[in-house]
Image: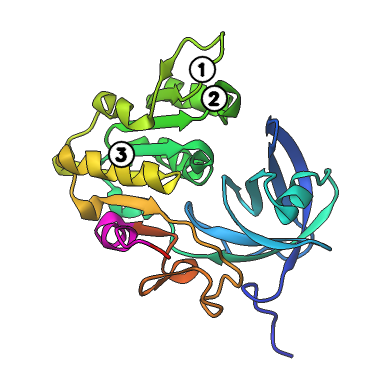
Amino acid sequence: MTAARPDLVPVPYRVGERTERTDDTADLVLEPVAGALPPFVPGQFAMVYAFGAGDIPLSLSGLDGHRLTHTVRAVGAVSRALHGLPPGATVGVRGPFGIGWGLTAARGRDLVVVAGGLGLAPLRPLVRAALAAPSRYGRLTVLIGARSPGDLLYGRDTDAWRAAGARVEVTVDRPDDGWQGDVGVVTALLDRAEYDPRNATAFVCGPEVMMRATARDLRHRGLGADRIQVSLERTMHCGTGHCGHCQLGPLLLCRDGPVIPWRHAEPLLSVREL
């Protein structure tokens, strides 16, 4: 009998833990029921199936052995179904899919991580991996932008990252009465990033307009387009590069992305989509 392919047949995982992050966002820690999927790397994604609702692509926001953490925002039928699952519930998972952040290629360089909103989720494992091996990399700067203080994710993580030696700066667009931090777009924080543009790599994830602005400003600051990595999002249905829903120019992002260098992304994102 031919073994089941984890890219085509969902593998059962159980919700081991569920943590509320914001009013509409929660972490689901998934544990294999029997056999686990092959190892993931930061930046890759899985297709997660809510029984009776369907499946959606979800980036990994945490990697701990065979335990997979996904940060789920309830915005559609499938994500709402997943978001509401209690510990003990079972889901189907396919993967791993896509190309990750390529942290290994950045050894010896300063790292600049720029996240907008939920874009911090797929960058979180990268930051953790860099801090777990500080001798391999130079300075680490993490710049985080969110819509409001209530939309900020991973407060304890960001405190721990600072304590571990990373420079972490945070800004919001819509402050509340208790907010005492920066207000404005995340690109306004780039002046505080600590890096040598001749020997640095940037990792950027968030809304497309934010990534374009961040990449443009990093280029103006001397960072090469081949050393700016962005994670692009398109509608993904199969995860295997067959259905074509995630096509962007010559790329199928589930197969050729989601992480690609800015030198490839810039001309593709400059084309107006009809």
How are the residues colored?
A: rainbow
Q: Secondary structure at mark 3?
A: strand
Residue 61 image position (x, y, % from top left): 57, 45
- The one nearer the camera, 48 or 39, is 48
Residue 87 image position (x, y, % from top left): 83, 44
* Mark 1 → mark 3, Cα distance in angstroms: 28 Å
- The segment highlighted magenta reads 261-272
- Please say if 265 is above or below 210: below
- Labelled pair 2, 1 in contact (Cβ < 8 Å): yes
Residue 114: numbered disc = none
- The one nearer the camera, 43 or 184, is 184
Q: Give the amino acid at mark 2.
A: Ser
User: Callout 2 environment at 10 Å: few (<14), some (14 to 19), or many (20+)?
Assistant: some
Residue annotated with mark 1: 175
* Mark 2 → mark 1, Cα distance in angstroms: 6 Å
Decide whether residue 90 is among the magenta residues. no
User: Callout 1 environment at 10 Å: few (<14), some (14 to 19), or many (20+)?
Assistant: some
Mark 1 against mark 3, which lies toward the viewer?
A: 1
Q: Earlier in the sequence, mark 3 or mark 2?
A: 3
Residue 2 image position (x, y, % from top left): 70, 88
Mark 3 against mark 2, which lies toward the viewer?
A: 2
Can residue 67 be seen here? The reply is: yes
Q: Earlier in the sequence, mark 2 or mark 1?
A: 2
- The one nearer the camera, 45 or 250, is 250
Residue annotated with mark 3: 111
Residue 148: numbered disc = 2
Residue 237 image position (x, y, % from top left): 61, 69
Q: Give the amino acid at mark 3.
A: Leu
| Residue positioned 55% across, 22% down in the render | 149
From the viewer's perspective, is 211 left or right of 51? left
